[in-house]
Amino acid sequence: METSADLLPFPKPGFAQRAFSGLFDLLYPPHCFHCAQPLPDGPNKYLCDRCFKTVRILKGESCPRCAHPGKSPTGEDCQFCRTRTLRFDAAVAAVEFGDASRAIIHALKYHGNMPAARLLGGWLAAALNDHPMRDSNLIIPVPLHRSRLAHRGFNQALLIAGTLSATVNKPLHDGNLRRIRHTETQTRMSVAKREENVKGAFSLRKPVLVAGRSIILVDDVMTTGATMSECARILKAAGARSVLAVVAARA
């Protein structure tokens, strides 16, 4: 039987990490992120097989322009793309944002469960494995505003991007792209309001570092693409050759 570890591989930990993980698992046996059922010993320590079967893997099944799960059967941009101006050149999402993938992302984002970042970063590496733009030469995470970073204590996009960087052996630049204006939570906003909400919210400390580079822009979830599109606009204005938007899950 195939498990999430078989279909969506992630990097193997080093000796020290394995030793610590073994001791931790002995004291606190691993449970499925979604249903909380105990997990058997083995490489799959994030989702049980039953919950993993509910995860829709989007490789080859989403719009290549915006990663929307509603891919056009003709291969053209989907209806969502045709009604939007998106500044990134293409997009990749590992999975569709559903109950199980939401549980993993929320475990990281709101509960500080760091192993979830390693899983999500591994999913991204698998999704990029044969993508035409996989050879982009710089990875940049979508930044948090300093006030939200202080409140949360970490940037989930940076943690996911760190695993991706280590897996695909590409440099990670954090701190150059920054969020200079606090933005409201966009959960209940329309597409137009989301675009207005993030307009002018980002800048680059050193634009020269992205000039002529092909960028992989990383975040945890994409809903309308407004945030990543605005980040891509800033990167392109500084001379970036291309921007590939990459997310763990696409709503």
Image (tube, rainbow, N blue to C red):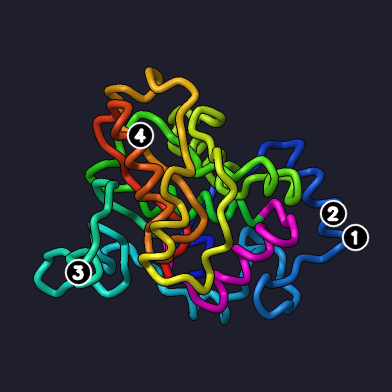
In this rendering, the label closer to the viewer, 1 or 4: 4
Q: Are marks 2 and 1 in contact (CB under 8 Å)?
A: yes
Amino acid type of the residue tagged 2 in the rendering: Phe
Measured in 3D between alpha carbons, the distance from the residue under mark 1 to the one under mark 4, in whole angstroms, is 46 Å
Q: Could you tell whether 199 is left or right of 112 in the image? A: left
Q: CA distance from mark 2 to mark 3?
A: 46 Å
Query: In the rendered structure, which amino acid carries the disc numbered 3?
Result: Cys
Q: Which residue is mark 3?
A: 78
Q: Position of residue 131 (x, y in %)?
A: 27, 48
Query: Residue under circle 1?
Result: 27
The secondary structure type at the circle numbered 2 is helix
* Residue beneath disc 4: 235
Disc with the residue nearer the chain's start (1 vs 4): 1
Sequence-first disc among 1 and 3: 1
- Gap in angstroms between the C-alphas marked 2 and 1: 5 Å
List the residue tagged with mark 2.
Answer: 24
> 10 Å neighbourhood of mark 2: few (<14), some, or many (≥20)?
few
On screen, 104 above or below 100?
A: above
66, 169: nearer the viewer: 66
Separation of residues labelled 1 and 3 (CA atoms): 48 Å
Image quadrant where residue 59 sits: bottom left
